[in-house]
Each structure stands twice: as C-alpha cells, then as structure tokens.
C-alpha cells in the first residue's frame, strides 16, 4: 500500500514582487458577508450596530433584496446615542430583547460592529458577554467587526468565524474540519468524496445549526475552503488545531490538490484516492474543456474584490488557457494563497490594495478580453467597450469542487459568448 | 437606536450623490471609510448608468484614524480636481467621517482650488436621502446662481429631477413638450443633465416648475425669495392634476389659459369605456413618497374609480401634508419608514391592490395582493427602457397601463366566479395574462380531513374573536382570491359587531348582503 505523497509548491508567482497601492478602494466592507452567512446559519441572527448607511449597504450590496424575512438587521445609531443622552448599551439591550422575543427561533446572535460603532468605541464584546449571561443557555451572543475601516468584503466571514473559535468545545477525537461557508450542494459533494477516502468524522464551520457546531482539539485537522479566512486559521492554530495547507478547490487542479493534501494528512491509500476521484475528475475535465473553448488565448484582468482572485487566476490560466494581465486582491496573505501563487505561472502583475483610478488606467491600456470587477465598475467598463464579469457572482454561485468546475469556467465564458451573440 | 430591516431611504450623502451624478461637471469628494463605495452600484446597476458616479471617496481605514485623516481628505480633493477638472466641487462627510469631525468644507476651501467649492452639512444621524438631495441642490444653487436678465421669450426652469429618481428622465421630456405646447421655453433643467454653467443661468428663467418637492423645494423657495422667481405647487401627475398644473402655469406666466392639444391622452376614454367598469370600488392601499402618494390618491379615486382604503408616506418631511390628504380621503395616514408597520397595515386592511414602492411590491407578493410601483425606491425591473413618464398626458396613459396590468381583467373575473374549480383556470393560477403561475394545487385528502379553525384578529370584537366553521371556510375558498381578503374581513367585522362567535356559511352570506353595494 502506498500512501498519497506530498507535493511541494514553489516557483510560479511565489516571488513576484507585489504592487501595493492605496487610494480609493472600490470594494465592499465586511458587513456584506452577512448576506450569505445569515442563510448558511439557519438559527443565527446578525445584528449590525451601525448607521443608516450600513442598513442601506446590506439591502443594496447584492444588487437584489432578499425578501424572505432576513435574519439580519441594523440597530441604527441616532443622534441621542452619539450625544450620550442615551446609554447605547441600554438601547442595545432593549433592541435585542425585542428582537429575541419576536424571533424565538434564534439561537445565535452576532453583534456586528460597524465603522461608526468602532469610531465611537462602543464595546460590543462587553455587550455580548452581558447578553450571553442574560440569554444563556438558549441563545449565545457573540460579536465581531464587519466595519469598512477594518474589513474588506469577505473578511467579514473571516471575522465572524474567528469570533466563534474561542467558544468551540474541546474534543480529542480524530476529525477533519472544513472551514468556510459553502453552498450546501458543494459541501455535500466534498464530504462525500472525503468519506469515500475512508475519512470519518468530517465537520464544518460554520454549521447550519448551533447544536451542530463542532468541537476541536489536538487531533483535529482543518482545511480552509475559502482563501479569505486567515484570521480564523490563526485562531484555530492558536487553539492547537493543525492546518492542512493546499491550493483552493477551484477547477480540476485545485480540487485535486486540495483533496490530495487532505488524503496525505489522513494517510489515504494512493490507489483508493485515484479510484475515488477518477470519475468526478474526468467529468470536471470534460466540462471545463467545453466551456474553456471560448476562453483559450483570451486575457483577464482582476480588480480586487473577494480575495478569490489568485486561486481563480490560477484556474483560468492553467485550465482554461487564459493569460492573466493583472491579479488584484484586497490583501495577499502568502501563508494562505502561497500554493495557488506557486501554481500560477509568472507573468501577471500581482497587486494588493487599490487606487481605483490608477488601476482603471492600467486596465484601459491593457484592453483585457475579460475584466473581473465589482458592480460599481462593471457597467462603466462595459460602456467603454470592455467585457466584464461581476466578481460578486463568484461568491454567490456554487463554484468549488469537481462538479462545479465547468460552471466556473462557463461563468467567465458567458460575457464573451454574449458579446459574440449580440448583433448590436 | 432603532432596528431597521429594510430602509426606504439611504443616508443623506446618497442624496448628495443623486445630485452630483445627475449633473455633468459637478464632482463630489466624500470623506468616507472603505465600503461606502457600495453606493456607486445603485447608479451603475439600478439606474443602469454607463459611467461611474463622479464621486471620490477618501477611503480611510482604522490605521488612518490615529494619524491624519484630514491630510488624506486634502490629497483626495487635490487628486480629484486634477483628474476630473470639474466645474465645481461639493464636499461632505458620510456617517463615519461626521464622527471624526475633520470639517471637509473648511479643509477644501483652504486649498485654494480654482473652482467653486460647496461644503455640505449632511447630518447622517438625523436626516435621510431625500433631505440630502434637496439640501445639496439648494447649496449648489445658492452658491452658483446669481440674478440676471430674464430671457426675452417667456421661459421657465424645471427643478428637482435627479439621478436614481422614479421616471425622472421621461418626466422631463413630457413636461417640456407640454410647456412648449403652451408657448413657454424651458431655460434650464436641473440637476438632471445640467452643467455648472447651466446652474448659473437659472436666473434667466421667468419662473420655476418644481417637479419633485422632495428634491427641489429648498432651491425653489430660495430662488423665489432671492431672484423673485415664482414656482409651481401642483405636480402634473394624473389627468386632473395636469389640467390644474396648466392653469397654474398660465397664471404664473400671465398668459391666457391655452387650448391644449390632448389628442395624445387616452386615459380618460380608457377609464370611461365599459371594460373599466370592474375598477369601480376596488379597494387600494397607497404608500410611497409624499408627492407620488398625493398624485396617486387623486388618480385612484377620481380617475380610476377605486376606493382608497389607506395611504401613507415614508418621508417624514411630508407627514403633515399626507395627514391632511388622508383626512380628505376619510382614512388615517400611515407615516413610517418601518416596512413591517406598512406590511401590518396592509394585512389588516386587505386591499385588492397596492400602489407602492418596491417594498410594497414584495409585501404584495407575500400576501398575494397585486401591486403597481408608483414611487422610489424602485427595483431595476421598474426602470424601463421604453418611454414611460408619470407626468402629463403620456404619464397618465402609462399609469393606466401600469395599474391595470396586475389586476384580473373584467370578464376573466366573472369566469373565475362561475367556474372556480376549473383545473387550469382558477384563482390559484392567478391572472391568465401573467405567465409563470403554478397550476392549481389539488386539495389533498389530508387537507380535507383537517378541521379548519381560523382565529380572527378584529380589534372591535364583542367578546373575543370569531371562529370559522369548516363549511364556511370552504365556502370562503370558493370566492376568487382577489376578493377573498375583502370577504373574509367583511365577514369577520360583521360577526364581531353582531357578537357572532362561530362563522357559518349563513354568516358569510349575511355579511355579503350587509355590505352589498
């Protein structure tokens, strides 16, 4: 019996100097993550303590309004809260009481800090402690910051998950923990493959229900499913949980290497590994090939958005035959995206942060075939004649794993297909 | 602190963005943290604009707070001027920047930039989007507009239309056509489409047409006081209002009341024709911004023949006006920006149709009540490609079509009454001219066996709520969905006032006879 062996990731863009910019950033703040987190955790409520701007952002960010009664809301600070005429903590307690009596199904309450609450130094950790005592054991109250002055877009999920780590239970069981919110269908597929490797005890963070939240310990191994969870990874490692490092599971290559890293850690037999992945992997390759026909030889330019940019660039270049011109990310944590950077052939500019006007100048000059950017820039760039892919769709669509690899390529092919189809 | 789930209005700086984005060479430097750029997508997505809003965000982060955020502001201001070369700049703070008190206005003025700098005070913790737009446009006008010689021919300005306004683009065109028909030139339209030099020419107009009081009234008042320009008070939405508006304009312009070409108006005959008989007495609930609600109420009652059963607005600036309006209609005004309150009011009133914003459209979806959108905030779906104004003759035509569309048509209504168990054509399938409805759900045995007991919530109950007996509940289900709510409510009210504890089939029909009209 041969165990799956380790692969070293080096070279590629590992040592490419990173262009660091600061200026106007055309990105969302971390509050935006609530839009998917509140659907993933079905007994949680996210209470933003902020301003009318925060509430307006949450309803506008997705470009749509989700009108099933949302499990999030904003406690809007008013003049009297700021002027000290009202004790903000008392006000918050009152709003929480109203909320929890109206929604008895809520078992986890996240108090989410915002720019204004951070600036006035409203101590939400104190509030969370106080409210936990009040509502335990039925409701657990945690807090984190999704403010724009501290977090960018998907970092909101990172901050949320990191806030859960200190209160995770202890266990010595051998187990695998998948960290990051995934669409249910993708989560089930990945767990099914991993179970077929013979790995038992597979848990997820976040869990759909409070009573399914995993315990962790020295015999727990965790792996990230999303590249934006650096703080959560640090918190888990600080808790003595060992991380499995791997490229992220996008496309055939990413999914295979991600699975391989787990298989190696759990000493899976190499033949079993290959047998389990053979069929889904072949399906992924076929599906990618079809969608990639339109992408081959085309160029792509990434504006910073969700931090998925580096793994996605790796997928588009290696598996769809594209050329990356610039790969911009809000932050580049090499400890997290190192393997993907190594697999991305040298060539593109890797940029971190943003000065949107300068980046737009570079983009216009490069005339990429596809520009991946946020909704604020997409129509203006289309108006200038560039094809764009809305970055946010990549966060709101099942794109991980083998079965979605073709869909992922198709997401990028669609703007090109559309441009070919329209005779306008 | 107040818990909000959905909001009708954004913060005031979004109102300022609506003015800046509407104009051609006005640039907005906004002192704001990372993330506030989300507001750009309102304009690029909902308004489908193909250019970025002319807004520079300073994008400060936590680490800047200890250092000097005012330097950051001045750098952003200087860069914005160099890059965009605007005709004037407005500067302000978003909610977070308001807390750090950097005084963007003072900072920008001290830079000595060679264009007018207009500082904005936008109190984020007290006011909202419409105030922000109104205040911004007022400050722009106050800074740039000077008294000047009037145009030789009689002319007016159209003030109030902004970016992200409900049908503002088309309203301008329709209104301009009506004014030209009257022999009146349009001097300047602002802020939508205006440049800084246009704002400077506002003084040449003989008077002003205030198209939307929500976003243009402060400027109009100031112009009346300082430049002696009268402004119109009637909003020409609806047939009667358009006629009144024409009279008002003639009187302000001191011209004889013109004979208007009304050949484009179809609303009046469409509403008089027999097919429209089924509108008579349809119970409608109206909610939106104060101006559109006022206009819609008049159209609903006086021009469509509906019964207005409730109305209200989300913008408190129009609370008094809306309360007076409600009195005129014999209903209580609902003044709130909490959509849950609006939903509760609609649920209690059980109207047959809602005229509202996108919030009410969703409430209607959930409650199964048809809804037409009459006011911002609106969804991208309600931003049509075709010419669809609200004002003037064509506006009336558009409103007729929009309001009729969600309703079940006359004969279909009768057929549904007659053959309610048809498997394809029944109430659960919805109006037949709308696709995408599920075919009828067959009543399962389980449902039939279940005892149906519904507790009612009528406020003026004599000795507790009434209970629906199974047969009565079944009979109620035979009534088509678009009047079922009304029937349920009437029956319950009837039972409550008569002290009837158990609602039987007889109670249902007694109530029907009682409320017959």
Image: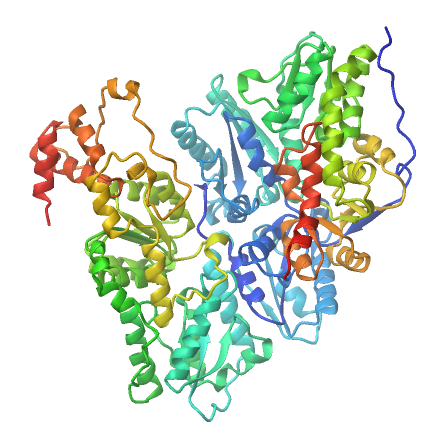
**Front-most of A230 and B136?**
A230
Q: Residue at x 34, y 66 (%)?
A: B397
Q: Quadrant of residue B108?
A: bottom right
Q: Residue B60: in sight, yes or no?
A: no
Q: Is residue B102 above or below residue A242?
A: below
Q: Is residue B436 above or below residue B161?
A: above
Q: Is residue B67 above or below residue A140?
A: below
Q: Residue B364: in sight, yes or no?
A: yes
Q: Position of residue B129 (x, y in %)?
A: 48, 57
Q: Residue at x 32, y 44 (%)?
A: B369
Q: How many marks?
A: 0
Q: Position of residue B412 (x, y in %)?
A: 26, 47
Q: Is residue B266 left or right of residue A369?
A: left
Q: How is the image coloured?
A: rainbow
Q: Residue at x 64, y 45 (%)?
A: A28
Q: Is residue B437 left or right of residue B17?
A: left
Q: Is residue A212 left or right of residue B239?
A: right
Residue farthest toward the bottom in the current orientation of the protein:
B152
**Front-most of B211 and B79?**
B211
Q: Residue at x 73, y 45 (%)?
A: B63
Q: Is residue B56 above or below residue A327?
A: below
Q: Position of residue B70 (x, y in %)?
A: 69, 57
Q: Position of residue B468 (x, y in %)?
A: 17, 27
Quarter in which the N terminus of chain B is drawn: top left
């Amino acid at each position: 019996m041969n165990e799956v062996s380790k692969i070293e990731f080096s070279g590629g863009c590992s040592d490419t100097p990173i262009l660091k910019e600061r200026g106007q950033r055309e990105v969302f703040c971390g509050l935006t993550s609530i839009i998917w987190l509140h659907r993933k955790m079905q007994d949680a409520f996210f209470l933003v303590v902020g301003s009318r701007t925060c509430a307006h952002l949450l309803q506008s960010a997705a470009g749509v309004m989700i009108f099933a009664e949302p499990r999030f809301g904003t406690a809007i600070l008013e003049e009297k809260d700021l002027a000290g005429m009202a004790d903000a903590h008392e006000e918050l307690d009152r709003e929480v009481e109203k909320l929890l009596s109206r929604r008895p199904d809520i078992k986890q309450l996240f108090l989410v800090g915002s720019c204004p609450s951070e600036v006035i130094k409203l101590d939400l950790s104190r509030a969370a402690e106080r409210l936990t005592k009040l509502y335990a054991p039925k409701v657990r109250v945690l807090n984190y910051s999704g403010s724009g002055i501290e977090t960018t877009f998907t970092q909101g999920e990172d901050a949320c998950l990191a806030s859960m780590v200190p209160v995770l239970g202890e266990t010595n069981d051998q187990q695998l923990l998948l960290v990051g919110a995934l669409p249910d269908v993708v989560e089930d597929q990945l767990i099914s493959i991993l179970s077929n490797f013979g790995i038992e005890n597979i848990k997820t963070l976040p869990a759909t229900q409070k009573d399914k939240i995993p315990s962790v310990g020295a015999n727990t191994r965790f792996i990230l499913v999303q590249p934006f969870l650096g703080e959560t990874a640090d918190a888990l490692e600080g808790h003595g949980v060992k991380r499995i490092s791997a490229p992220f599971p996008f496309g055939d290559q990413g999914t295979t290497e991600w699975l391989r890293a787990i298989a190696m850690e759990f000493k899976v037999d190499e033949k079993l590994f290959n047998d389990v992945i053979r069929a889904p992997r072949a399906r992924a390759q076929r599906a990618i090939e079809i969608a990639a026909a339109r992408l081959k030889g085309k160029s792509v330019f990434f504006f910073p958005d969700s931090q998925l940019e580096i793994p996605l660039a790796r997928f588009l270049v290696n598996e769809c035959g594209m050329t990356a011109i610039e790969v911009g990310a809000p932050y580049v944590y090499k400890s997290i995206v190192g393997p993907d950077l190594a697999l991305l052939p040298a060539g593109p500019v890797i940029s971190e942060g943003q000065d949107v006007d300068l980046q737009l100048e570079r983009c216009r000059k490069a005339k990429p075939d596809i520009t991946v950017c946020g909704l604020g820039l997409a129509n203006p760039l289309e108006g200038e004649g560039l094809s764009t892919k809305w970055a946010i769709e990549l966060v709101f669509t099942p794109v991980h794993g083998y079965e979605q690899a073709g869909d992922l390529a198709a997401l990028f092919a669609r703007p090109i297909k559309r441009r070919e189809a329209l005779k306008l | 602190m107040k818990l909000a789930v959905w909001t009708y209005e954004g913060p005031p700086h979004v109102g300022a963005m609506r003015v800046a984005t509407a104009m051609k060479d006005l640039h907005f430097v906004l002192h704001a943290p990372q993330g506030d750029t989300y507001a750009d997508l309102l304009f690029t997505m909902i308004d489908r604009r193909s250019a970025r809003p002319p807004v520079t965000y300073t994008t400060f982060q936590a680490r800047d707070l200890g250092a000097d955020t005012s330097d950051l502001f001045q750098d952003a201001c200087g860069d914005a001027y160099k890059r965009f070369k605007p005709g004037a700049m407005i500067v302000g703070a978003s909610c977070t920047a308001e807390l750090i008190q950097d005084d963007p206005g003072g900072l920008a003025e001290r830079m000595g930039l060679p264009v007018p700098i207009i500082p904005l005070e936008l109190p984020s913790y007290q006011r909202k989007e419409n105030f922000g737009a109104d205040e911004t446009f007022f400050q722009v006008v106050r800074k740039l507009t000077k008294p000047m010689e009037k145009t030789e021919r009689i002319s007016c300005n159209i003030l109030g239309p902004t970016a992200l306004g409900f049908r503002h683009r088309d309203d301008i065109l329709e209104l301009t056509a009506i004014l030209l028909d009257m022999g009146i030139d349009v001097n300047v339209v602002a802020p939508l489409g205006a440049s800084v030099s246009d704002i400077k020419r506002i003084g040449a107009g003989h008077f002003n047409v205030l198209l939307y009081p929500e976003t243009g009234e402060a400027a109009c008042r100031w112009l009346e006081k300082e430049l002696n320009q009268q402004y119109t008070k009637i909003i020409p939405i609806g047939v009667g209002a358009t006629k009144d508006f024409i009279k008002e304009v003639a009187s302000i312009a001191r011209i004889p009341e013109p004979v208007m070409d009304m050949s484009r108006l179809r609303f009046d005959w469409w509403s008089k024709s027999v097919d429209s008989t089924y509108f008579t007495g349809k119970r409608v609930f109206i909610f939106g911004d104060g101006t559109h609600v006022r206009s819609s109420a008049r159209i609903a009652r006086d021009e469509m023949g509906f019964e207005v059963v409730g109305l209200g607005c989300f913008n408190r600036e129009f609370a008094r006006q809306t309360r007076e309006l409600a009195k005129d209609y014999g209903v209580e005004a609902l003044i709130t920006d909490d959509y849950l309150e609006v939903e509760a009011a609609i649920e209690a009133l059980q109207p047959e149709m809602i005229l509202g914003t996108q919030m009410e459209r969703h409430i209607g979806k959930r409650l199964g009540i048809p809804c037409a959108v009459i006011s911002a905030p609106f969804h991208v779906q309600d931003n049509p490609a075709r010419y669809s104004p609200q004002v003037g003759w064509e506006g009336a035509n558009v409103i007729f079509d929009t309001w009729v569309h969600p309703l079940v048509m006359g004969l279909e209504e009768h057929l549904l009454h007659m053959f309610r168990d048809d498997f394809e054509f029944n109430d659960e399938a919805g109006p037949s001219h709308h696709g995408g409805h599920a075919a009828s759900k067959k009543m399962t045995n389980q449902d039939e066996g279940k005892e149906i007991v519904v507790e009612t919530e009528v406020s003026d109950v004599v000795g507790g709520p009434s209970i629906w007996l199974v047969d009565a509940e079944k009979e109620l289900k035979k009534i088509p969905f678009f009047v079922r709510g009304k029937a349920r409510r009437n029956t319950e009210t009837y039972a409550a006032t008569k002290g009837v504890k158990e609602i039987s089939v007889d109670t249902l029909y007694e109530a029907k006879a009682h409320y017959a009209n």
